Image (tube, rainbow, N blue to C red):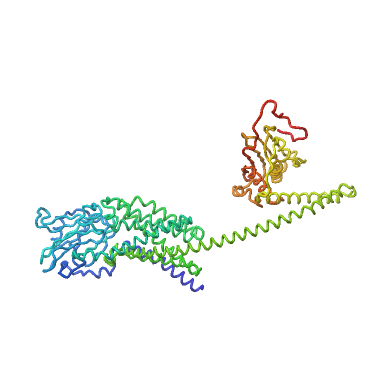
């Protein structure tokens, strides 16, 4: 297994190094040696394409010549003179010129043999080109371009003004019999120029279009189904990977919908600049969506944080390049973004293969790897075609368009397996959660029963210890101290049992509150009774506003809640520091605040306040159960109120209980209560 992983790692490193080299060659190499070998250097003139009665389709490859106008200075008359001077270079294959600002002139040579029909159709096999100006011989015309008429085609020509209403740029020709004819074509475009040209017999033209039209229908149909299906699943499952995949599919759909000429047919007379904008933006958006998709399906944020940041950077770089889609900088940003997209896809392939090797049961990783390899192969092949290293008529459609269809199907299959895995894991998690809940309920019932059974022996122990203490039989200080420890310990255990049982009852809804009407000062007396010993008396500062105000609350339970806060403040703050308790009314809302100068808590710990058994890190070394604040929060919630916490580490904490609407309506006159507290109550400051 180690040997296999080592070989895989070596292969990954080779792919990683080879892919950028191939991309750079595809992007910048003008032509390969193979392409150059197809063009004989001794050819001085292109032979005309001979059209016979049996010809149904014929390519003009090998029957044309090309002239590059780098400074845009040649008109048609200048092109004719350049041809007469022999400046047009004969070509044997159609090759892409890449994204170039140069103007390209083509001369097509045709010869209609005797017996062949006069009418033919010339099709220029590239839908996404800005301007195609075709000069056709016409003896009826005169002038600088004597004998030629101009046929305008291209994206910047409204669809209604094109010579033929077809997806690709096409026009009808009428050729003289037995006489060579030269057609001149001027090509200018901000997009890549990958021109190819063919001549069709008029009756056979529709039949030859069927293969490409069927492929386009299959392509857009599959992408539309994937988009509708996965956007619904992504929204339903709230899965980022599915939504990113859907965005990627939609961007590819939009790109080819406009670049293959389908949009021109369905949305006639659309401005050319708008088509350039949509095509360029959809390409960049596709790169951004693909980066997000790989980031999520491989969970890079968790497993590879640095790669996650790189993919986020690629996504933002692609989005920031959107404005360049209609400017001259597109010829710079497009190859750069394309190279980054290829490298990110290659990285995704490597990680997918690595994941598949480490976890053979993960079938989806194999589909991810296959989709990435298919996309890289198609993209590399397309770039070789665009840059002129391979002929433009190599396949019946754009190589990347063919590859992307297989890529989408592989990705869709992998994500479908991912959905199934997520569903299985979700069902398993639900089953485990149900089992854990049942187990917790059983444990809760057992502990509650056990705690209930503790009451009797604890009461017996405490009573016996108190009797020994009161009998006077124990006179030695050490024995008296031990008896006192027994009494205190049993009392704490009894309080803990009562607290646990009360919290459990509130949590289960089995304990109903019994509200009664009491004045605010009496409520505070009940709550603070027993906390004003020697230490508490000196440290507590109690402020009660409107002590006579009547409230309707469950006094015992609310007293437990307040006592828990005060007890914690005394326990977890430094000895000698003050603990301030303030109670008052905000309209009809009761507000009780307990402030200490203790150790404080972090924001993360504050968020967990009220969780059962939770104790902050500052409580280490101090006895406690983690039930006090949980109980306080449950009591406040049972009254329809809340417990809020403000804490600063090393400074202290402020706990606030707010119970809305528990105050009785204020009365005046004979029914007004005196503000003087009855005897025996805590002093109010």
Q: Is residue 633 above or below residue 105?
A: above
282 or 381, nearer to the observer: 282
Identify the residue at the far right of this view: 473
Identify the residue at the far top of this view: 669
Q: Quadrant of residue 669?
A: top right
The residue depicted at 10 percent of the width and 65 percent of the height is 177
Q: Pinpoint residue 679: horizontal percent, then vertical percent.
A: 77, 33
Q: Pinpoint residue 612: horizontal percent, then vertical percent.
A: 65, 51
Q: Pinpoint residue 242: horizontal percent, then vertical percent.
A: 45, 58
The quadrant of the rendering that contains the C terminus is top right
350 or 496, nearer to the observer: 496
Q: Quadrant of residue 453?
A: bottom right
Q: Pinpoint residue 395: horizontal percent, then vertical percent.
A: 29, 67
Q: How many marks?
A: 0
The residue depicted at 67 percent of the width and 27 percent of the height is 668
Does the rendering let one see residue 514?
yes
Q: Quadrant of residue 368?
A: bottom left
For this view, does 679 lie left or right of residue 182?
Answer: right
For this view, does 489 lie left or right of residue 359?
Answer: right
627 or 130, nearer to the observer: 627
Does the rendering let one see residue 44?
no
């Amino acid at each position: 297994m180690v040997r296999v992983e080592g070989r895989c790692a070596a292969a990954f490193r080779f792919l990683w190094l080879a892919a950028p080299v191939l991309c750079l060659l595809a992007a910048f190499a003008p032509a390969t040696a193979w392409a150059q070998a197809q063009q004989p250097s001794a050819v001085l003139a292109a032979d005309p394409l001979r059209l016979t009665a049996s010809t149904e389709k014929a390519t003009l490859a090998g029957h044309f010549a090309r002239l590059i106008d780098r400074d845009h200075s040649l008109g048609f008359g200048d092109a004719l003179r350049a041809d007469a001077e022999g400046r047009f270079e004969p070509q044997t294959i159609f090759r892409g010129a890449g994204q170039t600002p140069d103007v390209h002139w083509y001369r097509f040579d045709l010869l209609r043999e005797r017996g062949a029909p006069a009418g033919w159709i010339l099709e220029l096999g590239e839908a996404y080109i800005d301007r195609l100006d075709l000069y056709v011989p016409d003896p009826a015309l005169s002038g600088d371009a004597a004998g030629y008429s101009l046929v305008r085609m291209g994206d910047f020509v409204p669809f209604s003004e094109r010579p033929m209403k077809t997806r690709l740029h096409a026009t009808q020709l009428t050729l003289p019999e037995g006489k060579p004819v030269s057609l001149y074509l001027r090509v200018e475009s901000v997009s890549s120029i990958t021109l190819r040209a063919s001549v069709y017999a008029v009756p056979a033209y529709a039949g030859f279009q069927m293969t490409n039209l069927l492929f386009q229908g299959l392509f857009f149909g599959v992408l539309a189904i994937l988009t509708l299906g996965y956007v619904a699943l992504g929204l339903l499952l709230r899965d980022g990977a599915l939504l990113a995949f859907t965005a990627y599919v939609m961007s590819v759909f939009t790109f080819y919908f406009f670049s293959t000429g389908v949009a021109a047919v369905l949305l006639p007379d659309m401005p050319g600049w708008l088509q350039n904008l949509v095509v360029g933006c959809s390409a960049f958006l596709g790169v951004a969506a693909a980066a997000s998709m790989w980031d999520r399906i491989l969970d890079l944020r968790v497993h590879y944080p640095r790669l996650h940041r790189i993919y986020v950077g690629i996504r933002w770089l692609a989005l920031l390049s959107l404005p360049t889609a209609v400017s001259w900088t597109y010829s710079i940003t497009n190859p750069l973004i394309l190279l980054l997209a290829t490298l990110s896809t290659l990285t995704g392939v490597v990680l997918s293969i690595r994941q598949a090797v480490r976890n053979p049961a993960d079938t989806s990783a194999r589909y991810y790897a296959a989709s990435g390899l298919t996309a890289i192969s198609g993209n590399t092949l397309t770039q070789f075609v665009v840059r002129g290293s391979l002929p433009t008529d190599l396949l019946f459609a754009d190589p990347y368009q063919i590859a992307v269809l297989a890529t989408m199907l592989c990705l869709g299959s992998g994500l479908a397996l991912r959905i199934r895995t997520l569903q299985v894991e979700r069902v398993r998690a639900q089953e485990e959660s149900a089992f854990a809940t049942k187990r917790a309920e059983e444990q809760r019932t057992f502990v509650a029963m056990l705690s209930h059974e503790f009451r009797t022996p604890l009461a017996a122990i405490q009573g016996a210890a108190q009797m020994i203490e009161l009998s006077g039989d124990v006179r030695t200080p050490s024995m008296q101290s031990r008896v006192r420890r027994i009494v205190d310990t049993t009392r704490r255990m009894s309080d803990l049992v009562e607290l646990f049982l009360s919290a459990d009852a509130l949590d289960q809804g089995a304990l109903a509150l019994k509200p009664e009407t009491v004045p605010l000062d009496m409520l505070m007396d009940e709550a603070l009774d027993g906390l004003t010993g020697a230490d508490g008396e000196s440290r507590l500062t109690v402020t009660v506003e409107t002590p006579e105000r009547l409230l309707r609350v469950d006094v015992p339970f609310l007293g437990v809640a307040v006592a828990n806060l005060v007890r914690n403040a005394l326990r977890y703050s430094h000895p000698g520091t003050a603990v301030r308790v303030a109670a008052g009314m905000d309209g009809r809302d009761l507000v009780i605040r307990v402030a200490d100068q203790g150790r404080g808590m972090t924001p993360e710990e504050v968020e967990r306040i009220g969780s059962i058994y939770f104790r902050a890190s500052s409580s280490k070394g101090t006895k406690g159960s983690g039930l006090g604040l949980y109980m306080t929060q449950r009591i406040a919630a049972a009254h329809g109120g809340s417990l809020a916490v403000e804490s600063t580490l090393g400074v202290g904490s402020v706990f606030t209980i707010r119970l809305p609407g528990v105050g009785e309506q204020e009365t005046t006159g004979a029914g007004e209560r005196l503000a003087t507290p009855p005897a025996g109550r805590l002093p109010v400051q």
